[in-house]
Image (cartoon, rainbow, N blue to C red):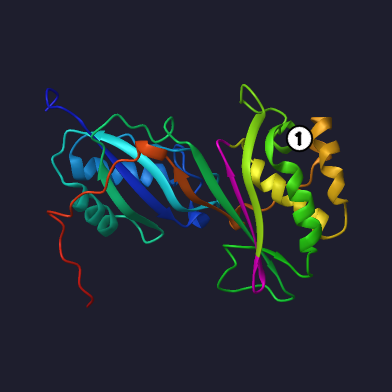
Amino acid sequence: MSGEKKRRIVLWIEYDGSDFHGWQFQPGLRTVQSDIETTLSVMCEEKIRVIASGRTDAGVHALAQVAHFNTTSRITPQKFRLGLNSMLQRDVSITDCREAVDPFHAQFDAVCKTYRYSILTRRAPSALRRNRVWHHRRKLDIDHMRNAAAHFIGELDFASFCPENTEASSTVRRLDRLEITVNEDEIRVEITAEGFLRYMVRTIVGTLAEVGRGERAPDSIPEIFAARDRNRAGLKAPARGLCLVCVDYGDKLPPPGDGRGDIEETET
């Protein structure tokens, strides 16, 4: 077995982060990585390590997390998808599975990522969306939030929007897009960047919410950046409202398979 050539398999993963202690493996705790690695190790009959585009924290969701693993198993990508979905718990779903022909790395080849944060603005909380939104009992000023959002675009030092003890070698990041939309009683903040610092999105959203509540002015954002002081930004928004929407790999994305070997799925 050790002499067989390893294949690189790429997964697209959707998960509800409510009952997970984040993506990354932690001894004695349930994480997305540990669930998938345990299941794949059984399927492949060998120890499997899964590498994702990046970790998500406890309570954070993903619509399309991307991860890869190496294996000597000859299981087809389609059967990996079907097998994983039959064995994993229902709060994790493998939405796509492909084999990388050219060199591919889920973390290092990522060009940019998009996160979405959802805020519910109505008097009553939501029973169905309670683990998907941050509930605000009063309306937020969308125009003020959008005016503040414009100050985040570009290459900036986000030291004020991440923990003071960050392990990152640099706190400079480039935000390509920060869009705020309204869908009935939900405000959705979508942010696209080449990379993020820990808690960066949640702290940006927490700061924008303070602007929406009238607790700080939209034009105060540049002063927060200049201070390079975490205490100058808003509190970080709760994890439950955050979702990793997609990861862009440009032309390095493995192509879809031809579907051969898939099993017909019918409704019962």
125 to 187, vertically: above or below: below
Residue 233 in sight here = yes
Verify whether residue 189 appears in magenta. Answer: yes
**Which image quarter: residue 43?**
top left
Which image quarter is the N terminus in? Answer: top left
Amino acid type, callout 1 = Ser
In the image, 193: left or right of 236? left
Percent across and percent down for residue 240 are 59, 56
- Residue sitting at x 18%, y 39%: 45
Residue 55 in sight here = no
- Residue sitting at x 12%, y 27%: 4
- Residue sitting at x 74%, y 47%: 150
Q: Residue furthest front?
A: 251
Verify whether residue 128 appears in magenta. Answer: no
In the image, 260: left or right of 64? left
Q: What segment is highlighted magenta in the picture?
A: 182-195
Query: Main SS of the magenta segment?
Result: strand
173 to 199, vertically: above or below: above
In the image, 181: left or right of 215? left
Percent across and percent down for residue 84 are 27, 52
**Which image quarter: residue 223?**
top right
Query: Which residue occupies the foreground of this view, 89 or 129?
Result: 129
Q: In this figure, which residue is indicated by the disc labeled 1?
A: 160
Percent across and percent down for residue 53 are 44, 38
In the image, 69: left or right of 238? left
Which image quarter is the C terminus in? Answer: bottom left
